[in-house]
Amino acid sequence: METDELFATLQEKEQERALPSDACNKQIRAACTGDLKACQAMSAKTRSLASLGLLLFVGLSVLLLARQRLSGVTAAALWGATGWALIQVLVLVFGLTRQRGSSARVRVGLALLVPTAFFGYLTLIRSSTSSFSEFVQQPQQTQHAMHCGLFSFVIGSVAAVSIMLLWRRTDPFTPRITGSLAGLAGGLAAATPVGLVCPGTDGWHLCLAHGLSLVLVVALGAVLGRRWLSP
């Protein structure tokens, strides 16, 4: 028993020698925290206003780039664009600004139902829908759809990424949901004005170029949300 106590005492002394001294601990703390400065994070209100301004800037920029096509925009199309602009605000408020107050079900519902409703809207405004084989056999149609879809995806992705940078490291619990809603807001910011100025009215064009690009931006937001929005 005495031998065991002796070995235990020796082991405790050995552990004490392995620990740094108090003076060394103070020097380590000073080296690690000496240049730290307190920073004031943006409030949710400031982030929300900045995000809203960003969405408005993206939408107006797209319309400005294609202003020569605005002469053919109908009143019905303007009302539709206004409706989707209001939906963007709702997504921003309930998806990002009130992410702690809104339930996860409500936010997941927004991420799923709004793109579904957008596809429904596209089917309502289509002029006609050719068969898919006929659509892909027309090079001009498919090329137009690819260009329109790529443009919408790029602009929507830039808007979504910018929104996530504004809300970076603000969601420790549901960053993927918040990221998908940031992608939804950014995707709508591109899809809404592009829909106003795009001359394509075939059902396949609208679904593949306008609708699918929105879904891809939402998916991109969900992927990046885990990395950028969690602390």
Image (cartoon, rainbow, N blue to C red):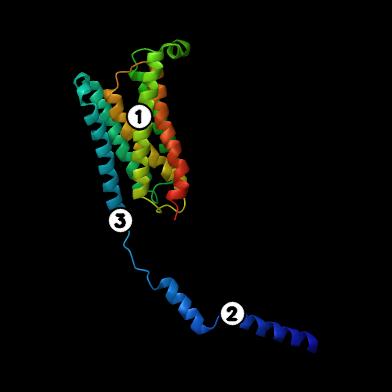
In the picture of the structure, the residue carrying the numbered disc 2 is 19
User: Is residue 225 at all visible to an observer of this figure?
Assistant: yes
Circle 3: element type:
loop
User: Alpha carbon of mark 3 to alpha carbon of mark 2: how far?
Assistant: 42 Å
Q: Position of residue 123 (x, y in %)?
A: 38, 19
**Which residue does the image show at 31% across and 53% down from the upper left?**
44
N-term mark: 1 or 3: 3
Residue nearest the viewer, comparing 13 with 110: 13
Q: Which mark is residue 43?
A: 3
Residue under numbered circle 1: 151
- Amino acid type of the residue that numbered disc 2 sits on in the rendered structure: Leu
The reply to whether residue 185 is in sight is: no
Q: Nearer the viewer, residue 212 or 144?
A: 144
| Amino acid identity at mark 3 | Ser
Image vertical order of residue 36 relative to residue 130, above or below: below
Quadrant into which the C terminus falls = bottom left
> Which structural element holds mark 2?
loop
